[in-house]
Image (tube, helix red, strand yellow):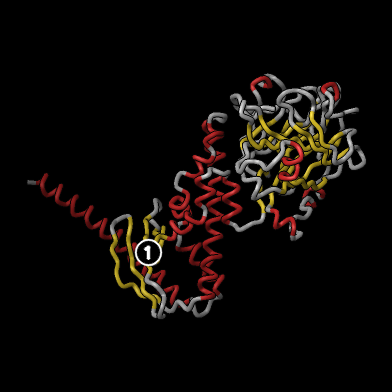
């Protein structure tokens, strides 16, 4: 009998606890509605929108509903090249940037809605709460405003937040996903989706911000044949700015990473770079002098026999700016000289190239709609000398942004840095596997 009383007591306690949690959720939502009704007449639309999103929306959960498996699927080709911790860090950083972008977009869209629509006061007309989630119907006093079905969820810390809203029977998360279907279904890189969500003219391909200081950049790797060579590339952070330092005295290791964007939509590529020591006599036309203080590869696609179609943008020791050429060996990239000589050694320079134009002048025609990746190479092995350079903030832009003059030099933040002379030791990350992008 006492056992039955104990079980009954436990069951009653659990039921009361669930009822308590449901009541807490209901009270929280009612409080949010009352607060909105009070503030809508006093706060500017932008301030009210920010407050609602920051305090009432579970941005992380909303992002999960929008993104689903996109982040991991878009980064699937890099998973095998990183250990578990590095992969989690890489995915986590990409996802967090998308969460922040979606949160910003929500604030912007809600601001526009509150500015253009007389919402009126809201009233709870129906509510159904369980212990972990609830569905609430809100109606507006204003005419012509559709009812809202608000879906709430209790988080692990016990607080309640809105995870989604249905308007005319369609979830807001679904509306957002439909906006970016092409990018997500095409498995373009997360930075491309971030740019679209933030409604930017450009995509940040690499700013090295996700990497820790003094190590190799996360997400980059090298060819199998370079496994035992010294990899003198290090991420540096100074005064809030992040860049990659590179120095070579014979190792000649190219760093590679997957990067997928549509070069027809974003055909203008820009970056910041600085050369401190040129390999004497470097001339990219010949094997015995084929050294560049700085080189950036764009891997567009592959030929039918699996050879990469790629272009290398270089800072040449001797060749004139604008020179386009290619060494006479199979699978060699075309090179384009973007900067030349030693007149601006030690200075951060802004570079801008037209990918579509250069592709047509080298490989012919238009590039495919999804690139394969990027490469970085500072080398001095052919001339048996030394080379030292720095790279930062690689972007691609729409042609419209370029034509309308919005592609401007953004490298001033690096020019303000103090001397960057450092001892580049040997970097260490987990060993990568081979790559179809190998030059």
Let me know if residue 73 appears in the view. yes
Residue 357 locus on image (x, y percent): 75, 45
- 153 or 75: which is nearer to us? 75
Is residue 117 toward the left or the right of residue 318 in the image?
Answer: left
Q: Return the residue found at the far left.
A: 1
Q: Is residue 100 left or right of residue 319?
A: left
- In depth, the one of 289 and 345 nearer the eye is 289
Residue 305 position within the rendered picture, expressed as x and y whole percent measured from the top left: 62, 25
Tag 1 secondary structure: strand
Crowd class of label 1 (few under 14; some 14 to 19; many from 20; radius 10 Å): some
Q: Residue furthest front?
A: 365
191 w.r.t. 363: above or below: below
Task: Give the residue at x 92% y 41%.
Answer: 343
Residue 199 image point, x, y percent: 61, 58
Nearer to us in this view, 109 or 217: 109
**Front one among 100 and 408:** 408
Quadrant where the image shows the C terminus: top right
Residue that numbered label 1 is attached to: 150
Q: Is residue 325 left or right of residue 8?
A: right
Residue at point 39%, 59% (across, down): 160
Depicted 96 relative to depicted 299: above or below? below
**How many numbered discs, if any?**
1
Q: Is residue 431 visible?
A: no
Q: Residue at x 85, y 37 (%)?
A: 323
| Residue under the point 76% across and 59% down | 405
Residue 47 pos. (x, y %): 55, 70
């Amino acid at each position: 009998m006492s056992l039955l009383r104990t079980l009954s007591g436990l069951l009653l306690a659990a039921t009361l606890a669930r009822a308590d949690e449901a009541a807490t959720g209901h009270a929280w939502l009612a409080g949010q509605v009352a607060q909105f009704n009070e503030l809508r007449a006093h706060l500017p639309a932008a301030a009210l929108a920010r407050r609602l999103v920051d305090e009432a929306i579970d941005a992380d959960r909303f992002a999960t509903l929008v993104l689903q498996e996109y982040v991991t699927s878009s980064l699937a080709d890099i998973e095998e090249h990183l250990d578990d911790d590095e992969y989690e860090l890489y995915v986590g950083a990409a996802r967090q940037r998308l969460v922040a972008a979606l949160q910003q977009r929500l604030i912007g869209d809600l601001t526009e809605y509150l500015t253009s629509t007389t919402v009126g006061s809201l009233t709870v007309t129906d509510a159904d709460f369980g212990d972990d989630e609830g569905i609430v119907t809100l109606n507006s006093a204003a005419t012509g405003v559709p009812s809202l079905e608000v879906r709430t969820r209790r988080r692990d810390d016990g607080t309640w937040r809105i995870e989604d809203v249905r308007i005319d029977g369609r979830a807001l998360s679904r509306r957002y996903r439909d906006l970016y279907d092409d990018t997500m279904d095409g498995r373009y890189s997360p930075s491309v989706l971030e740019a679209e969500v933030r409604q930017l003219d450009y995509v940040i391909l690499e700013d090295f911000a996700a990497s820790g200081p003094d190590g190799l950049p996360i997400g980059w790797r090298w060819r199998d044949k370079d496994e035992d060579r010294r990899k003198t590339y290090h991420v540096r952070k100074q005064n809030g700015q992040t860049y990659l330092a590179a120095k070579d005295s014979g190792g000649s290791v190219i760093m590679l990473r997957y990067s997928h964007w549509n070069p027809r939509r974003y055909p203008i590529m820009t970056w910041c770079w600085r050369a401190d020591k040129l390999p004497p006599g470097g001339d990219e036309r010949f094997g015995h002098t084929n050294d560049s203080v700085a080189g950036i590869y764009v891997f567009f696609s592959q030929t039918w026999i699996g050879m990469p179609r790629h272009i290398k943008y270089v800072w040449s020791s001797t060749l004139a700016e604008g020179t386009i050429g290619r060494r006479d060996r199979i699978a060699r990239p075309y090179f384009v000289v973007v900067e030349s000589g030693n007149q601006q050694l030690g200075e951060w320079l802004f570079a801008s190239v037209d990918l579509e134009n250069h592709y047509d002048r080298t490989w012919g025609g238009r590039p495919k709609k999804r690139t394969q990746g990027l490469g970085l190479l500072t080398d001095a092995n052919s001339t048996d000398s030394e080379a030292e350079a720095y790279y930062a903030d690689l972007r691609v832009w729409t042609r419209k942004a370029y034509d309308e003059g919005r592609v401007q030099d953004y490298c001033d933040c690096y020019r303000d840095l103090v001397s960057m002379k450092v001892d580049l030791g040997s970097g260490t990350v987990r060993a990568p596997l081979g790559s179809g992008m190998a030059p």
